[in-house]
Structures are given as C-alpha cells and as structure tokens.
Amino acid sequence: MTMDNHELFSTAFFKSPLMMILTEAATGKIIDANEQFTWFYGYEKAELIGKTSLELNLVPNPGQREAIVKSITETGFVKDAILQVRGKGGETRWMSASVHAVSIGDKKYFLSVMLDVDERTKAEEQIKEYKYFFNNTHDLTCIANVQGYFEALNPNWEKMLGYSKKELLEKQFLEFIHPDDIEATLQEIDKLKTGAVTINFVNRYRKKDGTYLWFDWNSTPDPVTGKLYAIARDVTEQKKADEQIKQLNAELEQKIIERTAKLAKAEMQIRNFARHLNQVLEDERAHIAREIHDDIGQQLAGIKIGFSSLKKTDGATPLKEERVNTMMRDVDVTIQSLRQIATALRPGILDSLGLIPSIEWLASEFEKKTGITCHLEVNGAEKEFEKNISTCFFRICQESLTNISKHAQAGEVKIKALQNDKEFLLEISDNGKGIATDKLENPFSMGLLGMRERANIIGANLQIISKQNAGTTVQLKTVLN
C-alpha cells in the first residue's frame, strides 16, 4: 500500500478511535504510536519510540509473534489476528490486530491497527470450556427451557438411560422422573422463582428398561431466559449402600432392643430373686435369733438356776461353792454372748419399735464399742415403713458404721434421718480418710455392691460420696407412698 498524501495519513493515524502503532519494516523499531494506544496500555510515547515490540514484550506469546512475522513475510499483511498484547504494568488483554505493509515516500513501514476484544474473547473461551465440559464430563449435563423440555443433552444421557436423544427431547423431563419424586423436584425448582441462585436435590430417573437411577442434581437458572443449566451425578450405588446401611442399622437396633429387653427381664428376675433371697435371709436370721434367745437362752437360764440350787445343798464346801459360782458366771457370759449374736442377726427392736429407734440403738452401740463420737439428728415424725424398707435402711446404716469402724480412721460420725410426707433420707458421714476412687468404683467391692443391691431392691437411690482425707458420706433416699 502506497501513501502519497502524508497529511491524510497523519489525520487517520492520530484521530482514529482504534489503537495504532507504526514500525520500520527493516528494523522493527517503533516510529510512532497514536494516543489511543499509549493511553490504553499506559505508555508515554517517548518510551515506545525507537524500540522494537520484542524489546517491549508487547506480544508475550512467542507463537503469536512468529505467526504474525510469517504472515507479513508471505503476504505483506495480517488480518484480524487474535493475540494478547502486554501493557506497561504487565497486564495482558486480548486484541484483534491487523498489520499492513505501507510505504511513505521511499521508506517501508508496518502499520498495526488493534481493536480491544478482551471481554468477547474471554467469553468465547468460557463458552468453549463450557461446551467441552458439557460434552465430556462423566456426569449428566443438560439445558431445559421454561416449558420443561430439554434443549441440550450431553451423550451420557443416552448411555445411562438407554433412550435416544430424540426420545429425550420430545418429552418434558418430568415424564422421566419417578412419580414419588415429582412433587419434591417441583418444590426445589420453585425455589428459583424466589431468588435462589442454585438448587440441589436428589431424585430418580427412569431408564428405558423400566428401572431407575438415582441422580444428585445441581441446577442454576439463566437470569434472562429462565432456562435451567443442570448437572447430575449418578449416586445409585451410594443410595443402595445407604439403604443397606439403613437396613443393617434397623436390624441392629431391633436386635439391641430385643437384647435389652431380655437383659431387662433377666435383671428383673435377678432382682426379684435377690429380693426374695434377702427376705428369706432376714426371716431366717429372725428365726435363728428367736431360737437363740428363747430356746438356748432359756436352757442356759435353767442351768444357772440348777447351779444356784447346788449352793444350797448339804455338804457344800467353800471349794465347791467357788466352782459353782465360776460356772454361773460362765453361764452369764454365754447368755450375754448369745443375746449379742441374736441381736446382730436380727435386732428385736427393729420389729418391735421400728426403724428410727433401731438407728438410734445402732448409733449408741457404735459409740460404745468404738469410742468414736456419733451425733444423731432425727427430723420428722416416724412413719411406719414397709418391712423391706426398714430392713434395707437398717442394714445399710449398719454396713456403713461397720466400714467406718474398720477402715475410715474417723474421729466423728454424723447420722441424719430426715423424713417428710414425700421422702425419707438417711445420711451417714464421717471425717475419716475417705475411700480411694478405684475402690469406690470397683464393681466387685462386695460391701459397696451389697449396699447398692439392697437399695435397688426397694427402688431407693444410694449415693456414696468420698474425697481423699475428707471423709465419706453415704446418702440413701426413698420416695414414700
């Protein structure tokens, strides 16, 4: 192209809304650049003049540079080449560039004219990427219109569902959804009408053979056309696994319920047996205590009377009298021992006077035998308790005091018996060394186990609270009918 009219060229070059640069054909050095170019890419004209585009790295992609040079060499021009052009700050933008060989006088130049197509090119690249993803993903992709018909489907639809593309496009997509899932699917789609940007849901699609596949959907609407762009992943195997797990959990839960019921029944039977055994034991103790007190005690009393009569017989000597006195003292000791044994087996006071007097007697006897100060606090009028309740509270109090005397090294004991219309509380506390945690939690500690079982038999609540070197407190509480 030959330009004889220099003034016309200058006007077109400097006034054009397009970006232009002029370079020497022989050296590639930039001779001039119009204001549109310098403004758009952030250069001062002085920074461009005398330098080549390679020095400025205006086109950073070597392949694009080589293609332009080859085209100019072969044809003398480049038309609408899409390339990236680098600005002064390092940022690049897509340009549509046309390069023409021109002559001004006897000199040859290259005139580069550029149009910014960055946004369009990026959009086209995104479309290309989307189309590639749309057609090559392993999932299902589709576009559906507002009438509920498919407009585009990737090949996986035909592979997975067995329908032809034509069969899929001819029907509304709701016709392929399992009847039980249609309402839930429509409810999710309705969310888009209220401003939801994307929706996620799971439903079943019918295959051509009549079976169904589960799909996990993500769908986004086009704000202008209202079309739905959706992608779905086949989760059929996951659903089957979930159902199997759910079924196994249900079966396991049922087995646990059945086993728990059996254990509860067995526990109830054991507790009933323990209650019966405990009652039999207490009855037998009471029987033996009465036998000792009434039968053997009376026999010993008779023997004592017999010995006493010997002292009055003729021919008694001081030696014989002393022997008789010794035997009478032995009988008294034996009678006292039998009374203590009988009382330990079953205190008569528990049956005759009731629980509170029996606890008072226990406190008194404990203080006499151990020398440990024992304070008793009784609050509320005594109610006549059931035999099992009286026996349980008495025995736990007895066991607690026995443990204190053997292990606690205490100097003081407090017993509280508090009663109102609703409940009865018995509390035994000491200031001893306490019970070690491992012993307190040991399920095979027979003394503590026995106390807990007694409480369970009557449905009472037993708590044992202990701290190292801070004593132990036993609390037993029952609800009164």
Image: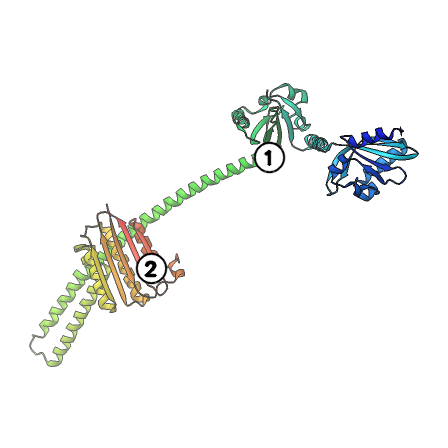
1 vs 2, front mark: 1
The residue located at (16%, 60%) in the rendering is: 294
Q: Nearer the viewer, residue 385 or 171?
A: 171
Extreme-right residue of the structure: 106
Residue at point 46%, 40% (across, down):
253
Query: Residue at image x 23%, y 63%?
Result: 375
Task: Residue under label 1, please give it.
Answer: 237
Sequence-wise, the earlier of marks 1 and 2 is 1
The extreme bottom residue here reads 318
Q: Quadrant of the C terminus?
A: top left
Q: Position of residue 131 (x, y in %)?
A: 70, 30
Q: At 24% from the left edge and 69% from the top edge, which residue is drawn?
A: 371
Looking at the image, how many numbered discs can be counted on the residues? 2
Percent of width and height locating residue 466: 35, 60
Q: Which mark is residue 461?
A: none
The residue closer to the viewer here, 268 or 315, is 268
Amino acid at pointer 2? Gly
Give the answer, above or below, for where 141 lies relative to 290. above
Residue 300: in sight, yes or no? Answer: yes
Query: Residue 447, which numbered label?
Result: 2
Rendering quarter of residue 163: top right
On the image, the x and y values in percent for residue 296 come to: 18, 63
Would you say the residues marked 1 and 2 are in contact, meaning their CB atoms lie under 8 Å apart? no
Where in the figure is residue 125, as x and y percent of width and height? Answer: 72, 33
Badge 1, how many Cα within 10 Å: few under 14, some, many 20+? Answer: few
Nearer to me, 100 or 265:
100
Using the rendered image of the protein, determine whether residue 341 is visible from the camera's viewpoint.
no
In the current view of this chain or complex, which residue is farthest to the front?
7
